[in-house]
Amino acid sequence: MTRSAPAPIDPPTTRPEHDLLGTRDVPADAYWGIHTLRAVENFPVTGRVIGQDPHLVRALADVKRAATVANAELGVLDAERADAIVRACREIADGALHEQFVVDVVQGGAGTSTNMNANEVIANRALELLGRQRGDYAFLHPNTHVNASQSTNDVYPTAVNIATRRWIDALVVELERLRDAFAAKAAEFRDVVKMGRTQLQDAVPMTLGQEFATYAVMLTEDIARLRESADLLLEVNLGATAVGTGLNAPLGYADRAVAELAALTGYDLVSSPDLVEATQDVGQFVHLSGVLKRVAVKLSKVCNDLRLLSSGPRAGLGEITLPAVQAGSSIMPGKVNPVIPEVVNQVAFQIVGNDVTISMAAEAGQLQLNAFEPVIAQRLSEGTRNLTRAVAVLTDRCVVGITTDAALLRARVENSIGLATALNPRLGYEAATRIATEAALTGASVKDLVLASGLLAADELDELLRPENLTSRTSQESPR
């Protein structure tokens, strides 16, 4: 009688892990462990997880790698474990396993769940690289080895600093492109005469080039302020451990870890001069948020201008035409809306609100640690990310395609009562006032009234209305 082969045994679908609260089953194929599991259950808040912020995950991997190198140099970790941890960190920094970072970005615990998530993913990948099973923490433990000489309270703020700096770098690139697009339009429109307005009333003649050059100058100033504030993020508290005293970290660890992290990131990172102060202070984020609000508010003002200048097309100002990117109405045929400036406006409103959130979170810190840094990090990363994308869209789908009707704008200048102000130095205040008043009462143009009164000859008036005689040339140079 022939015996049948035994049925294959399916591999287990879970593995048991334990913490101070007890034992839980974790999916066998997960790189994260029990601490991450509890965090996922505790914080189903925003629906956005830390793995969706590649800069933060990469920064966490870089911090863990730098710490491991320092620990190996100081004899805290043996070469075998350290090498496996470094290899795992390198893979994660290069983009692997980001889907395993599953904790919500907004969480209680001052970022502890984010740090635990990173520790577990790195540990289990390192175990695989060593030929061992995930969860074999007796050999390589997430906290004992991956988190050696560290605390959430120095790992998380350092990682947030680096991730935020990378987001700011990306934003600066897009702001520079937008500045250059406005500068190019300033050059294109340098001889297009139009009426300047104050309080929405006709003021004095200027050129459309000057109007657009102003936007480029504003962006140049904001880029400089943004870079200055971003440099504050280069001071980190790695090595502070729990409250800034460096407890459980060997002598020399902080300097070595920060130096290694600087080499990995390419940033000129320095250790904070007072780690106790640095561990509780989030002033760099408050300052940066204020500068981001400045950028957003000014961009929103520019977008308001673009919407107003393009209003119409026939019953509004209609001084510029924005590129048509989509139909504007389900009921009004032919209507095209300024949707690109409108979306930038809305992103700006978000950032203003973010600044309030960040301010409140910073103020709510107590004693040696701010427990609310996760929401600060979330608001900064989301706001900066959204603004970066909005600026790119504004550049590519709006500003570069703006056109104008130079003849129409010049005709409006010649018909504007504000033209009397430009003629004031030549005619004198009293004569210019009489001309302006008569123009307002009769509807006649200032130009026609000046010619009819014989105050100026036609060729002389045309000379006065030449763009180079109405405006300053220096303000039309393309800012760089």
Image (cartoon, grey):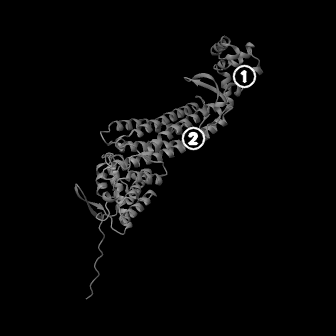
Res 157 visible = yes
Task: Identify the mark nearer the N-term, 1 or 2.
Answer: 2
Residue 1 lies, in percent from the top left, at 25, 89
Would residue 128 appear left or right of 220 to someone viewing this image? left
Q: Please name the amino acid that badge 1 sits on.
A: Leu
Determine whether 206 is above or below 184 in the image.
above
Determine whether 437 is above or below 351 in the image.
above
Residue 334 lies, in percent from the top left, at 57, 37
**What residue lies at 71% left-to-right and 24% top-to-bottom?**
465
**What residue lies at 36% left-to-right and 50% top-to-bottom?**
239
Check disc 1 and report its element: helix, strand or loop: helix
Answer few, some or many: residues within 10 Å of disc 1's Cα (few below 14, many 20 plus, some between 14 and 19).
some
Q: Which of 2 and 290 is in front in this view?
A: 290
- Residue assigned mark 2: 178
Q: Please name the amino acid that badge 2 sits on.
A: Leu
Q: Nearer the viewer, residue 246 or 473?
A: 246
- Residue assigned mark 1: 464
Determine whether 302 is above or below 37 in the image.
above
